[in-house]
Structures are given as structure tokens and as C-alpha cells.
Amino acid sequence: MRLSERRTITELRRQGYKLTPQRRAVIRVVTASPAHLTPLVIYHRVQQEYPGIGLVTVYRTLDILDGLGLLCELHASHSCRSYTVGTPEHHHHLVCSGCQRVVSITDCGLEEMMQNVAGETGFRIDDHLLEFAGLCPSCQREGT
């Protein structure tokens, strides 16, 4: 289940963040899109409503939202990060290299591996990221 604009704003307030019109606009753009958006795309969409907004403001807002777990960050698209509204459950991604479709998967099965790696290395593992890149069934049929 994706977080809504209202729930995202409520969580920011609960955490003590100010809700400037520009920050609300960034949230609105991200929550309105079913697709992952790059910071530059978010910036251009917000700029239509707030021409004076700076790219730094967009990045700062994305950092805050990501830090609170309210965004889902994707890394696979040509080394450029993109974002969408987060989901409360832990998940990972399958990314189609043909059409850029993103599918979330919730069962990664890495917990035992993380424990083994932590035990062998002495690291305290706080988080992990897993993304698979390949072709979705539609792109496979099209021969992409």
C-alpha cells in the first residue's frame, strides 16, 4: 500500500518538519505519480507551480522524505536515482531495462545471509538494497 499525500504530510508534521508550499508541491508531485521520478523531473513539475523553486530545495525535501522512510528510492536507471512514494513494508525491485517498469517484491530472503555476513565480518548491518534488472514479460515478447 502506497502512502498518500495526506499521510506523508501528517508524518512530516509529526516529526516536526515545516510544510512550506514548495515542500508540499514536491510531495504532491511524487504522490500523484505511479512511476518513479528523477529529482530533475520532480523539479520541472514543481517549477510549473513555483517558478522560483531551487533544485536544492527539491533534493533537500527528497532527502528528508527518504530519511523518514516515506519514499522509495530506485537506483537502477542509468546510475540516476529516482523516487516514488514509499510503502510501509520492506521491499525490493525488479526493473525492466526495456520499458523501465518497476515491480516491487516483498520477500527477499536475505535475513539469514545478512546474519552470516555480519557474523563473519563483525559488521552491524543496518539495511540492505536489492534490485534486479532484466526484461519484463511484455518486453520479452516484443523482443526488446
Image: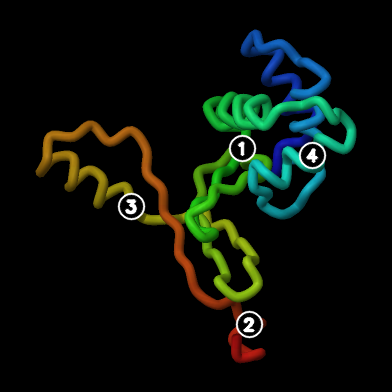
- Residues at marks 3 and 2 touching, judged by CB atoms closer than 8 Å: no
What's under tag 4, amino acid-wise? Val
Q: Real-space Cα distance between discs 4 and 1?
A: 12 Å
Answer whether labels 3 and 1 touch (C-beta < 8 Å).
Answer: no
Three-letter residue code for mark 3: Leu
Res 83 → quadrant: top right
Residue 133: x %, y % from top left: 48, 68
The quarter of the rendered structure image containing the C terminus is bottom right
Total marks shown come to 4
Q: Please, what secondary structure does the residue beneath circle 3 have? A: loop
Kindly check if marks 3 and 4 are in contact, taking CB atoms under 8 A apart as contact: no
Residue at 23% from the left image edge and 31% from the top image edge: 124
Circle 4 — which element? Answer: helix
> Which mark, residue 139?
2
Q: Mark 4 sits on what residue?
A: 29
Determine which residue is flagged by label 3: 110
Element class at badge 2: helix
Please say if the residues under marks 4 and 1 sit with CB atoms less than 8 Å apart. Answer: no
Residue on which disc 1 sits: 71
In the picture, measured across the screen, residue 115 lies left or right of residue 126, that is left
Task: Give how far apart the Cα atoms at labels 1 and 2 are.
Answer: 27 Å
Give how far apart the Cα atoms at labels 2 and 4 are: 28 Å
Q: Residue at x 53, y 64 (%)?
A: 94
Inter-mark Cα distance, 3 to 2: 28 Å
Q: Nearer the viewer, residue 15 or 37?
A: 37
Task: Point out the tag, 3 or 2, that comes first from the N-terminus.
Answer: 3
